[in-house]
Image: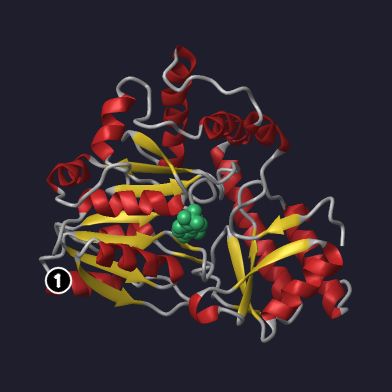
Amino acid sequence: MYRFKPDLRIPGPAPVPCGVSIQMSRQMINHRGEEFKKRFPRVLKRLQPLFGTKNTIYMLTGSGTSAMEAAVSNLVSEQTPTLCLVGGFFGKRWAELCLSYKANVHILNFPWNSGVDPNEVRAYLKQHPEIEIIFMVQNESSTAVLNDVKAVSEAREGHQALLVVDSVSALGGTPMEMDDWNVDVVVSASQKCLMTPPGTAFITFSPRAKEFVEKSESSRYYFDLRKCEEYLMKGETPFTPNINNVFALEEALDMIETEGLENVFSRHYLMRDMMRAGIKALDLELLVNDVDASPTVTGIKFKEADHLRLQIREHYGVEFAGGQGIYAGEIFRIGHMGYATPLDVLTSLAVLELEFKKFGEATKAAELVMNE
Ligand SMILES: *Cc1c(COP(=O)(O)O)cnc(C)c1O
């Protein structure tokens, strides 16, 4: 295997462009100094089109789960009735977090290979007017399902519940329209479609969600949103942030803005369609149907998935991800998020062809690029 150029095709951390990596090695600056105060609020503002919001975006130093925990600790108190929509590993994480904060947790389970059904949500909310907060995942990376956030939001039909969305593996790869879709909290992280290394997370609150932040009786210190708010007024974070990740994000946003957000999304949808065409051509079984399929990761059923992944890593230096939760060992997942192009899809399919000795089959996916 070519150890000098490992090819990471997992749903995060995703590959980082060279220009972004260079930013990671820049000289340190004072996080209480003028330069940081000038640059930091500006980079957060540039994230707003990706979130589809005019609300303030806060940056936390931590992985994506830190922003998930911040959402819970800042909104949920003991016995707050919450509804978690669970269709995979990350939906389950919301439920676990709510339990840790002693919420009164309601769980709606969905099959782990299809999207959240908004009709079930609507029916459940009709029976449970007491629910105060709904937690869901936009792109369930563990199953390669893209959920319809807008439809779930609309299914509330005037119900009081806030809607909190984990968009960690979606934001920057597929549209999130927080304001138009009436979403109350969105969380994301640096290491997926945002093309920067792990270590920072993002969170934003609607005005209505902010009222919950004041009301929450849960313990919080490092991730107390009120502290973030107070310091952001000065262009700062309450504690020392991951400063180089801010520089890195500036560079990544330059790339996204140059390509154009709409084009970035089309590239992800093209990669999804190519991947699915190629997998079908190889007679492999996709985990998810066309309607619910994620644009940033593809799940493939395979009996000896982990052995296959090992072989492919050994032979070609290409790294696919395994299954999680009920799919551990049953599927493999191919990430195509952030710094990824149709060429990466072709080479991912090519190594599968080589491994299965089915030369030429999967390159049918190339037709999709040539037809672009
Ligand atoms: C990657 C990911 C997370 C965050 O995981 P961390 O390891 O804490 O960064 C959360 N939700 C989804 C859907 C993810 O894909």
Which one is in front, 283 or 371? Answer: 283
Residue 70, placed above or below residue 228: below
Residue 273 location (% of width, % of height): 64, 63
Residue ID at (63%, 61%): 272
- From the viewer's side, name the closer residue of 163 and 283: 163
Q: Residue at x 21, y 61 (%)?
A: 156
User: Whole-percent x and y of residue 353?
Assistant: 83, 73
Residue at 34% x, 30% y is 238
Label 1 residue SS: helix
Relative to the observer, which residue lies in front, 164 or 102?
102
Mark 1 residue type: Lys
Q: How far across and down, in percent of the image, does residue 73 sit? A: 25, 52
Question: Residue reaching furthest top?
Answer: 34
Q: Which residue is mark 1?
A: 126
Q: Quadrant of the N terminus?
A: bottom right
Q: In this view of the protein, can residue 371 be seen by the observer?
A: no
Q: Name the residue nearer the viewer: 237 or 165.
A: 237
* Label 1 crowd bin: few (<14), some (14–19), many (20+), radius 10 Å: some
Whether residue 203 sits left or right of residue 266 in the image: it is: left
Mark 1 C-beta closer than 8 Å to ligand 1: no
Judged left or right of residue 90, residue 333 is: right
Measured as percent of width and height from the top left, residue 210 is found at 20, 41
Which of the 4 image quadrants contains residue 54? top left
Please, is residue 208 above or below residue 295 in the view?
Answer: above
At 51% from the left edge and 30% from the top edge, which residue is drawn?
Answer: 243
Q: Residue furthest bottom?
A: 303
